[in-house]
């Protein structure tokens, strides 16, 4: 089972009664997906460039509608593209939370590139923040977003911020596909307004060989 949660500066709630066939095995029927986004669908997408995890300056983010004042970016709907096909390298140890998080980032960037977006730049400051936010959800009955303004104070810079959450023992490619198949998560994942990000994962049950991982994907633009 895969549970997803997403946040951005303003929020909407999506109650999903029928999930796409591709993720029917990952989400419970009637699962609640909390999608928080800015005014309108995500903007799409600058010409692609090389993917990869590139270090970048400090950045951050919010959930409860209290982000720093700024002019909202213009948004346009994503251009449809082929369904991304990606799997992590065979040598990736998916039981290692750091390698799992890195594989998720690579998968997100592979999806963005295939859909015509520039890859997200990996931000070390956001990586530490994402790990802390994920750790705060260990044992939680639901995935609930913490406020985003503290992240913007911890990692200064940027005017737009967002977060996607997951909790599962499934491989990274299943998480990426589930995010793509959920409109509110996809808005964050492919938004051209969000240019830096990081993913932090922590163990929340499971076995040593197949741990359940809570992951926070933090974006900033």
Image (cartoon, rainbow, N blue to C red):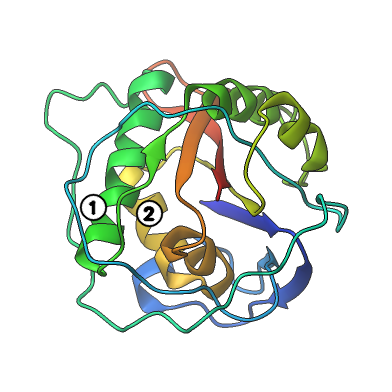
* Residue 83, numbered label: none
Q: Position of residue 123 (x, y in %)?
A: 47, 29
User: Where does label 2 land, which residue?
Assistant: 176
User: Relative to 192, is 218 on the left or the right?
Assistant: right
Q: Residue at x 11, y 30 (%)?
A: 90
Q: Are marks 1 and 2 in contact (CB under 8 Å)?
A: yes
- 203 over 175 or under it: above or below: above
Q: Secondary structure at mark 1?
A: helix
Number of marks in picture = 2
**First reached walking from the N terminus: tag 1 or tag 2:** 1
Q: Position of residue 108 (x, y in %)?
A: 34, 50
User: Where does label 1 land, which residue?
Assistant: 110
- Give neighbour class at mark 2: few <14, some 14-19, many 20+ (Cα, 10 Å): many
- 100 over 87 or under it: above or below: above
Extreme residue toward the left, this view: 90
Q: Position of residue 192 (x, y in %)?
A: 44, 63
């Amino acid at each position: 089972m895969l549970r997803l949660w997403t946040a951005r500066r303003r929020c909407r709630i999506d109650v999903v009664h029928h999930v796409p066939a591709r993720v029917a095995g990952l989400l419970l029927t009637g699962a609640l997906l909390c999608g928080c986004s800015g005014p309108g669908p995500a903007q799409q997408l600058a010409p692609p460039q090389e993917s990869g995890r590139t270090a970048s300056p400090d950045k951050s983010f919010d959930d409860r509608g209290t982000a720093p004042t700024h002019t909202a970016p213009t948004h346009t709907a994503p251009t449809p593209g082929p369904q991304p096909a990606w799997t992590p390298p065979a040598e990736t140890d998916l039981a290692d939370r750091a390698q799992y998080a890195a594989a998720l980032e690579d998968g997100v960037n592979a999806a963005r590139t295939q859909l015509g977006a520039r890859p997200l730049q990996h931000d070390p400051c956001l990586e530490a923040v994402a790990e802390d936010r994920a750790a705060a959800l260990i044992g939680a009955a639901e995935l609930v977003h913490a406020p985003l303004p503290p992240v913007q104070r911890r990692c200064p810079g940027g005017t737009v911020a967002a977060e996607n959450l997951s909790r599962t023992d499934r491989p990274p490619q299943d998480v990426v596909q589930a995010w793509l198949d959920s409109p509110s998560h996809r808005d964050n994942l492919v938004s051209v307004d969000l240019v830096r990000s990081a993913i932090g994962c922590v163990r929340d049950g499971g076995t040593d060989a197949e741990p359940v991982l809570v992951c926070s994907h933090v974006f900033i633009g």
